[in-house]
């Protein structure tokens, strides 16, 4: 990977690094992204229409079945080289903050700690009424097409309806995680934006905050996004290839 010498030294001197990930970082693990044409979650079942409280109100079995289908993808997948490279980086820079829009646990399974999940966790459903966490049986690993309708479980404490542990469109992000993410983006020396179309707000604003704070911003994506003209460096290609190469070029002892 050819990086300019001054950028390499700037990255090597960085003390506070933020890595911000989207669905693209889990794509090479076999988890469909939201927008890719082939198997994007939006395409074959209009994810944006399903990922809302209104959809769950209207047809809880359809929404719960969709999330159980997606959970089966997560159960059947393994962290990929991108997740592992990010986990390795955590041990090599003074302070690394990992912020993800993803609801899977692949960063954790790759060894990353203290992951800031802005949009929740698919494996941590809770009761809509009393908000108690609800333990789920292990997900089926069959990744059948699109998932069928499945009535959500009832809360063992109050009988309320259990809902997916994610942040839906129209719902507020978890206050603490959001606050920490904004502070990290505003105070970092380097901001890596990996595998996200940067469409969903307010998460997409984190990269803008890092740019405004004059951090070195690097976008890793297989396609162009609106950030291309704004970041310090675009690295075009799959995160599972780019990130290990970037780490080897800048922080060689992370091999
Ligand atoms: C809120 C959890 C207020 C659920 C998700 C108009 C303008 C601006 C904003 C809005 C608007 N109208 C409404 C809004 C707000 C809305 C929003 O942003 N809408 C968008 C669609 C315009 N936002 C909200 O509603 C948020 N809440 O605003 O609340 C509020 C405040 C106070 C009180 C009450 C309310 C909540 C948003 C959270 C929604 N939940 N996920 C679930 O997963 O089902 S969003 C979900 O979609 C993901 O979490 C993620 O954020 C987003 C998908 O984006 P990506 O991760 O980027 O995935 P995508 O497929 O798009 O892109 C993949 C990228 O990877 C591509 O670029 C591709 O090229 C690349 N790629 C693919 N393979 C690879 C790769 N790159 C590298 N390597 C590869 N191998
Ligand atoms: Zn309950």
Image (spheres, rainbow, N blue to C red):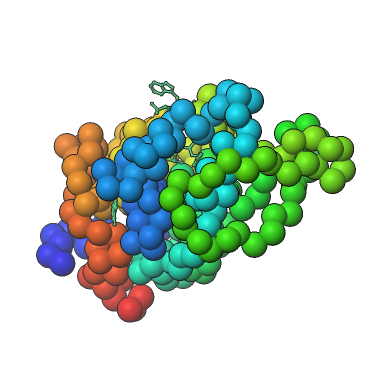
User: Would residue 165 be found to the left or right of residue 245 on screen?
Assistant: right
Question: In the rendering, at what x and y percent does residue 75 appear?
Answer: 53, 62
Which residue occupies the foreground of this view, 244 or 97? 244
Question: In the rendering, at what x and y percent does residue 206 appear?
Answer: 40, 37
Question: In the rendering, at what x and y percent does residue 87 appear?
Answer: 45, 67
User: Would residue 57 be found to the left or right of residue 214 on screen?
Assistant: right
User: Would residue 67 be found to the left or right of residue 138 on screen?
Assistant: left
Which residue occupies the foreground of this view, 225 or 67? 67
Q: At 45% from the left edge and 46% from the top edge, which residue is drawn?
A: 146
Check the picture and name the quadrant holding the C terminus: bottom left
Q: Quadrant of residue 132?
A: top right
Viewer can see residue 81: yes
* In the image, residue 87 above or below residue 206: below
Which residue occupies the foreground of this view, 174 or 249? 174
Q: In which quarter of the image is residue 246?
A: bottom left
Check the picture and name the quadrant holding the N terminus: bottom left
Residue extending farthest to the right is 157
Q: At 35% from the left edge and 56% from the top edge, which residue is drawn?
A: 27
* In the image, residue 88 above or below residue 192: below
Q: At 80% from the left edge and 35% from the top edge, which residue is drawn?
A: 160
Question: In the rendering, at what x and y percent does residue 188 appear?
Answer: 40, 47
Q: At 78% from the left edge and 41% from the top edge, which residue is drawn?
A: 154
């Amino acid at each position: 990977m050819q990086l300019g010498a001054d950028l390499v030294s700037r990255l090597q001197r960085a003390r506070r690094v933020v890595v911000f990930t989207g669905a693209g970082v889990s794509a090479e693990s076999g988890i469909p992204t939201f927008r890719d044409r082939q198997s994007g979650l939006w395409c074959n079942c209009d994810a944006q229409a399903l990922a809302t409280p209104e959809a769950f109100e209207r047809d809880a079995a359809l929404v719960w079945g969709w999330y159980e289908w997606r959970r089966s993808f997560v159960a059947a997948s393994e962290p990929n080289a991108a997740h592992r490279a990010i986990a390795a980086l955590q041990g090599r820079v003074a302070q690394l903050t990992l912020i993800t829009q993803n609801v899977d646990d692949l960063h954790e399974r790759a060894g990353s700690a203290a992951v800031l999940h802005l949009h929740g966790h698919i494996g941590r459903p809770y009761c809509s009424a009393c908000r108690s966490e609800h333990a789920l049986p292990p997900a089926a690993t069959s990744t059948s097409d699109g998932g069928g309708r499945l009535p959500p479980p009832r809360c063992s404490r109050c009988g309320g309806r259990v809902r997916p542990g994610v942040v839906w469109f129209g719902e507020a992000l978890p206050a603490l995680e959001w606050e920490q993410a904004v502070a990290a983006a505003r105070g970092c020396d380097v901001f890596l934006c990996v595998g996200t179309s940067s469409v969903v707000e307010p998460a997409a604003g984190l990269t803008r905050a890092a740019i405004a704070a004059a951090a070195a911003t690097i976008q890793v994506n297989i396609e162009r996004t609106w950030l291309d003209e704004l970041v310090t460096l675009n690295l075009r290609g799959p995160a599972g290839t780019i990130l290990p190469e970037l780490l080897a070029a800048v922080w060689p002892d992370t091999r």
